Image: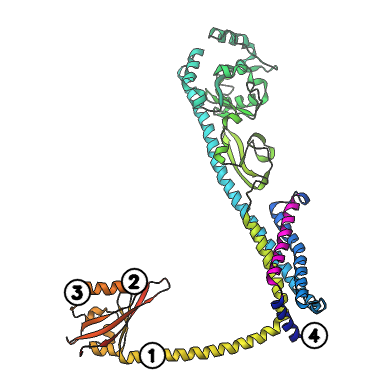
Amino acid sequence: MGSSSRSAEALDALHRIDRPRLLIEVALCVLMTELSIMVGMPYVFPELSDVASSVVDVLLLALVSGPLIFWRLRANLNRAFGGEGKTRWIADDLLLPIVAMCSMMVLTAGVVHGYNLERRKEATAQMELVASRVQREIQARFDRLLYGLHSSRSFLLAVPNVDRALFRAFWDGRRVGQEFPGVRGFGIIQQIPRSDSLALVQEQRRDGAPDFAIRSAGSAPDLFVITHIEPVAANGPAWGLDVGFEDVRREGIEAALRMGRPILTGRIVLVQDGARRAGFLFLLPLQGPLGPGDPAFGHGKVTYASVVVDELLEGIDSVAGAGVAIRLWEGLRDSARQVYGTRADPVEEGNVGRRELVVGDRSLLLEVAKPEGSMTFDSAVVLIVCAGTSLSLLVGIVIWMLGAGRRKAEDLALAMNADLLEARRVSDGALRESRAVFDTIHAHAIVSMTDRQGRLLEVNDAFCQVSGYGRRELIGKTHRVVNSGFHDVEFWNGMWKCMAAGRSWRGAIRNRSKSGRTYWIDTIVAPILDESGQPERFLSIGYDITDR
């Protein structure tokens, strides 16, 4: 079979194929394949990331739906031609369309990959903003605690020998639970040599605490005893406790006394917290830095706040927004211990915002993230996949058909060229007729063209002759140059109102020439509209009717 006859046969097949049926079959192939992939992917490839899932989805869609669609196309061709043998040569030309289709599918996979990367970048940037917002809120809550500690220290320094009743009255007046939400209590820790334990117990009992007793473990030469804690009802297990028995607490208190500044201990569990959640002691020494040469060395005092992190950060998730996981770590990420978390779900590493906080010389690492699988469904991904797949299949089919119909297309091109030549001949004739009509009007009528402000852009010889002005005197001027003053303002307003509405205006106007002679013009003014339908220029055609 020759190339020319094949071309004609292929194009003839296009007219004989049941196009609606073929379109429905192609759509069903793509739809059923995509639904099968979407249902089966989570079970077959459960560990794939969003990007990898998109790429695999595209490739599977191409590999499965491509052969199905060509199978249905060939079946429709066989039905149109009335036999498979007549269309075998068409199937032999599938190599180039298949290569083109696969190339388009790879390009689609690249587009999906790039889109997902941009989407992940946007999500990460959003998480960074959320992290900044949450960081400010957490920092504000710790700053509120520090404010309370400074208030406590100022009070204790102002009243050096404060008794228990006065200390309790001070904190009852502050309403700890309302002014400092999330704080278990404020208290005093006193450092003493172990040999002074009995003397301290007697002193505290004389100060209105008959049940005071020291609870200590270990054999350290000095103790760090909680002598005051308010509200005592909520912190009973901590009252009288030697917090120096445990290394984290001791290191924090010793650092505060040594450096003379606020110190946040490492992660601890408060003895008064039955749920045994992560907590801290926030410490502020009453004295400045204490060294071995200081008189108060070995007898330091600190005021402190006991904190359960879950209680301090209660409601913080409302700052981050719905569906956002918040985690707070003590220390840097590699060696950090988690002290707070709103969700236990694993998070997507590329969708995490991190911020570092420094509270009382201790580094805290904040993480906010969307948990895995929580990213909202993005219809754009499905749209890109479906559009790319459909375009790939369309390109394959078009290349296949173009290869078969190339010679016929050349014949059609020649015929179209002849039609274009004929159309050009007709349009040239119409243009000549229009030019003849325009020249006739210019020869026998008074013609002018103005812009929307009424400034003259063009005038013909007849206009110059009747007005007595030359073109250079007229261009750029308005028709006021020939205004005789005969017509009132209402006359001109009516004319402009009509033309501004996009309608032509006709009327008789009395003008005055350069020599002072008056003359009447039967005038038609037509607006020339721009693309938005507004007047852009005005064409005036008139005839001298003075002699009438």
Residue 1, numbered label: 4
Cβ atoms at labels 4 and 1 below 8 Å apart: no
Dot 4: what SS? loop
Examine the rendering and report whether any part of residue 163 can be seen: no
Question: Marks 4 and 1, how far apart in space?
Answer: 57 Å
Q: Which residue is mark 1?
A: 437
Q: Position of residue 257 (x, y in %)?
A: 57, 24
**Dot 2 crowding, Cα within 10 Å, few <14, some 14–19, many 20+:** few
The residue lying toward the viewer, choosing from 477 and 140, is 477
Q: Which sits earlier in the primary sequence, circle 4 or circle 1?
A: 4
Dot 1: what SS? helix
Q: Which residue is mark 3?
A: 488
Q: Which sits earlier in the primary sequence, circle 2 or circle 1?
A: 1
Q: Which sits earlier in the primary sequence, circle 4 or circle 3?
A: 4
Q: Is residue 498 left or right of residue 415?
A: left
Magenta region, residue range: 17-42
